[in-house]
Image (spheres, grey):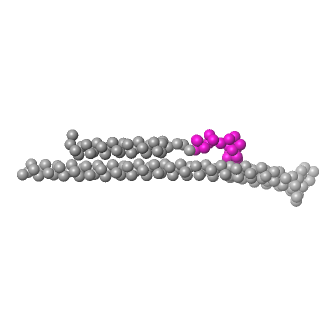
């Protein structure tokens, strides 16, 4: 084995060691979404569930339809069947306020949990990107080494061709 071959073998071993070191330092990528979901308590899951449902057009249309029907009934129905007299709509206001009082804290809790989850995902993305950057650097070093070896081989081939022609 030539001196050059020994150097190449040592460089390949160094590359393997560097790759193993990267894998030890950063480990395999984890699914942060699943980990975060398993850490949530039942009330936190409920808050996220409600936050995700209340923030939809479907929920808006339900509330809009309920309000429209309620107000229309109590304005246009015969007086003897109206249960929440116009113009005060006291019962409707009371129920609407109860819904708001219960939904607002749940939505805020859900948004805080979603924000925390976003921060965890961002940190995980940073770690994955850092590992990818190190791996890319390693690949570039390896490619540079291969390019040097190919150039050396080409020089040797040219020398052999020149020697054969002479």
Identify the residue shown where x is 32% and y is 43%: 12
Q: Position of residue 105 (x, y in %)?
A: 74, 51
Compare residues 36 and 87 and report the one nearer the observer.
36
Q: Position of residue 150 (x, y in %)?
A: 24, 50
Farthest residue in the right direction? 80
Left or right: where 112 falls relative to 71: left
Provide the residue span drawn in magenta.
Answer: 33-51
| Magenta highlight: main SS | helix
Query: Can residue 145 be found in the magenta stretch?
Result: no
- Residue 71 figure quarter: bottom right
Q: Position of residue 108 (x, y in %)?
A: 70, 52
Identify the residue shown where x is 43% and y is 52%: 133
Identify the residue shown where x is 81% and y is 51%: 98
- Visible residue check, residue 28: yes
Farthest residue in the bottom direction? 87
Left or right: where 9 falls relative to 51: left
Compare residues 122 and 5 and report the one nearer the observer.
5
Query: Can residue 42 be found in the magenta stretch?
Result: yes
Identify the residue shown where x is 27% and y is 45%: 8
Compare residues 164 and 17 and report the one nearer the observer.
17
- Visible residue check, residue 53: no
Number of numbered callouts drawn: 0
Q: Position of residue 118 (x, y in %)?
A: 59, 51
The quarter of the rendered structure image containing the N terminus is top left
């Amino acid at each position: 084995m030539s001196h050059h071959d020994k150097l190449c073998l040592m460089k390949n071993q160094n590359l393997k060691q560097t790759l193993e070191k990267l894998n030890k330092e950063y480990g395999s990528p984890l699914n942060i979404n699943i980990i975060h979901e398993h850490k949530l308590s039942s009330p936190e899951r409920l808050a996220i569930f409600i936050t995700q449902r209340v923030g939809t057009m479907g929920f808006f249309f339900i509330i809009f339809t309920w309000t429209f029907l309620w107000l229309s009934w109590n304005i246009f129905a015969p007086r003897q069947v109206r249960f929440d007299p116009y113009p005060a709509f006291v019962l409707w206001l009371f129920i609407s306020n109860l819904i708001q009082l219960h939904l607002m804290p749940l939505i805020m809790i859900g948004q805080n949990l979603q924000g925390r989850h976003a921060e965890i995902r961002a940190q995980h993305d940073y770690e994955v990107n850092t590992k990818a950057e190190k791996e890319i650097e390693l690949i570039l070093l390896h490619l540079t080494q291969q390019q040097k070896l190919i150039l050396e081989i080409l020089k040797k081939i040219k020398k052999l061709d020149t020697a054969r022609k002479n």
